[in-house]
Amino acid sequence: MVLAEFFIPHGHCYLWKPELVGLHLISDFLTALAYYSIPLTLTYFVTKRSDVPFNWIFLLFSGFIIACGTTHIMAIWTLWHPNYWVSGWIKAVTALISVVTAGELVRLLPQALTIPSTAQLEAEIKERQKAQAALLQEKTHLAQAQNVAHVGSWEFDLASQDITWSDETFRIYGLSPGQPTPTIREHWQTIHVKDRKAWKKTVHQLIRGKSCQLEFRILHPDGFIRHLFAQGEPIFNTQGQVYKLFGTLLDISDRVAAQQRERLFGSIALRIHKSLELNEILDTTVTEVRQFLETDRVLIYRFNPDWSGQILVESVGEPWRGVLNTTLHDPCFGKDYAQLYQQGRVSAIANIYTAGLHPCHLQLLKPFQVIANLVVPILLGEKVWGLLIVHHCRSQRHWQSEEIELLQQLATQVAIAIPLIVKSMDISFLCGHKYNRQLSRLARNTSS
């Protein structure tokens, strides 16, 4: 080795005493073994925890410790081999790595001191947990308030196209809050066909940064139409660009229905006030009812003394066939059914083919193309004058209590109007008859 012949082994310094040589040998070996194991542990830690800040300092420490371990190996080697120049150069490399490591550690010390301590982290965690609990409570209160007021909220991220609904919004759309939020395409399918253009225009206005309001209709999973009132606000980022849309949603179906009912009753009452023609009043009634219920056919059926009858007026939509002036005799309808209708019986059937109707009754309804029907009696005192009938032909339909109540009120209004019209017609007839007699008497006197 390098100039080894000029030196004597280190063991000579220990006089080759076995105890002393063994002590240095074992001590240096165990120290080197420990030094080599520490970098392995540090390297494994850094590999598994890449999120640790300043992880490169651990690798620098590993190099420093390996160099230190190597000096102890050389101490064992020089006990028998006097390669002190090699040992010196290894120590020089170790010194260089040590100085660099020490300098970097001093430079990183201010940054390392900013890392929170365990106590600080625990305090911060407690604060965050407290804030999250308060946020959760606030969110719960908001959800409860929305549930009470029946107001839902929504949010739309323009970049990710993600939609967020509150629980009440799910309920407004007839869905369960736990299920996935519908996509834009799925939501588009729920909007009433006639309102899609206005809805799309409103969304474009929001994207352009304008606040908007819109009343539109949706189709519930159960087939019913609901009226909604939506308000939207654009949310801007720091560059002044719209990146989110936020808004609220209110189910105004009850309010719209009340307005429509008021308008419906007002229209029929006005017709009764202006006209003494029974057919004109009944025709107005069935037309207004069909438009209000958005159904396929509404008719008024009048009974004859033998319980046969005739369809007096009808309002029917496309493409369903008209049945005006059809005379019917229902073999299933007898005194038992008559008594039930005299007691105010209402027949609300969602699907005549699954309701267990008598075959003869089904045979009677089949030509009308009806699937769901709603029948309310028109009572003059205790006598059944006729029936106010609604036919839903396109699909089955579960009739709502508000719709049944509306039809009962209209049947009562028609029942009140009929005697008044008949009485007015009788008075007009009597007055006309008296006027004709006076004209005849005046003519005879003139001739004389």
Image (cartoon, rainbow, N blue to C red):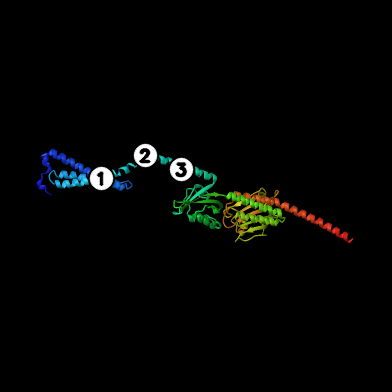
Q: Which mark is residue 428?
A: none
What residue type is disc 1 on? Thr
Q: Nearer the viewer, residue 133 or 106?
A: 106
Q: Which mark is residue 101?
A: 1
**Measuring 83% from the left and 58% from the top, which residue is drawn there?**
439
Q: Nearer the viewer, residue 126 or 387?
A: 126
Relative to 183, 103 lies left or right: left
**Measuring 46% from the left and 43% from the top, which residue is drawn there?**
136
Rendered location of residue 158, percent (x, y) = 46, 54
Q: Specify few, some or many for label 3: CA neighbours under 10 Å numbering under 14, 14-19, or 20 or more.
A: few
Marks 1/2 in contact by CB < 8 Å: the verdict is no
Of labels 3 and 1, earlier in sequence is: 1
Task: Classify the position of the C terminus by image quarter.
Answer: bottom right
Q: Which mark is residue 120?
A: 2
Q: Which residue corresponds to mark 3?
A: 136
Q: Specify few, some or many for label 2: CA neighbours under 10 Å numbering under 14, 14-19, or 20 or more.
A: few
Rendered location of residue 324, percent (x, y) = 66, 60
Q: Specify few, some or many for label 1: CA neighbours under 10 Å numbering under 14, 14-19, or 20 or more.
A: many
What residue type is disc 3 on? Leu
What residue type is disc 2 on? Gln
Secondary structure at badge 2 equals helix
Does the rendering let one see residue 259? yes
**Measuring 82% from the left and 58% from the top, which residue is drawn there?**
436
